Image (cartoon, rainbow, N blue to C red):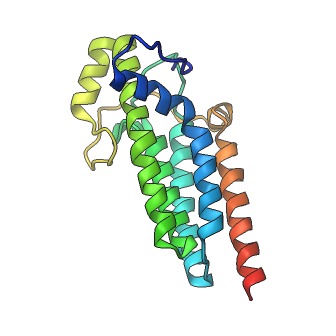
Amino acid sequence: MTEPYDAPASLPLRMQYLHWAQKFRVPLGFLAVLVFVLLMEPRVPLLIAGSGIGFCGLLFRFWAAGYLHKARTLTTAGPYRFTRNPLYFGSFIMLIGLAVTSGSWISGLVFVLLFALIYIPTMLREEDELRRGYQESYDRYAAAVPRFLPRHTRYPSSGQTFRFGQAFKNREQSAFFGYLLVLLVISLKLFLRR
């Protein structure tokens, strides 16, 4: 996958927005976490339940990252057999987990809106890049596998295998440590409120 670049002003507004959303998704994610920390009202049962949900999302992301070879091959194995965007699906599950831990419906709403405004356009932009790079192969894959919500039917096996080291090459440990840091902040706020 190529790195996002500044969109030329001559592009249609939709394409400029897709470029912008892809470029700023990570900084806006940090901003959403800041809003989350300020608004959260954690409680122990919600922290336990939300953490479990979030770790399921982390595991899904790690599974996907172990198959992903960016810009080298069209990945259609592992979780990519069920959804074209398993990393973003895992992130969404993590956000749901954080929303539960927060005890604040406003935090949950902020996360869902952020996801819709940033990650849906990012998925569309990445699809355009994959379609240009892999043409008919990607068209066949996209016709058989849903964009986001996993489907129980599988795309035929491509022979690609999970590599633990590949997940680290894709820097998936950053998601893990980031999530642990947020849970630590939630726990600290919970402790200080007592």
Looking at the image, residue 85 sits to the left or right of residue 188; the answer is left
* Relative depth, front residue between 15 and 88: 15
Q: Residue at x 40, y 26 (%)?
A: 125
Task: Name the spot of residue 10 as percent of width and height, x first.
Answer: 40, 10
Q: Quadrant of residue 173?
A: top right
Looking at the image, residue 88 sits to the left or right of residue 150; the answer is right
For this orientation, the residue located farthest to the left is: 143
Q: Is residue 185 above or below residue 140?
A: below
Q: Residue at x 34, y 43 (%)?
A: 148
Looking at the image, residue 124 sits to the left or right of residue 78; the answer is left
For this orientation, the residue located farthest to the front is: 9
Task: Name the spot of residue 67 as percent of width and height, x first.
Answer: 52, 33
Is residue 126 in view? no
Q: Is residue 162 above or below residue 50?
A: above
Q: Is residue 28 above or below residue 189?
A: above
* Relative depth, front residue between 140 and 191: 191
Task: Name the spot of residue 153 as percent of width and height, x first.
Answer: 25, 45
- Total marks in image: 0
Task: Name the spot of residue 26 as percent of width and height, x first.
Answer: 59, 39
Q: Is residue 1 above or below residue 52?
A: above
Is residue 78 in view? yes
For this orientation, the residue located farthest to the bottom is: 194
Q: Quadrant of the C terminus?
A: bottom right
* Relative depth, front residue between 138 and 188: 188
Q: Quadrant of residue 50?
A: bottom right
Q: Residue at x 52, y 57 (%)?
A: 94
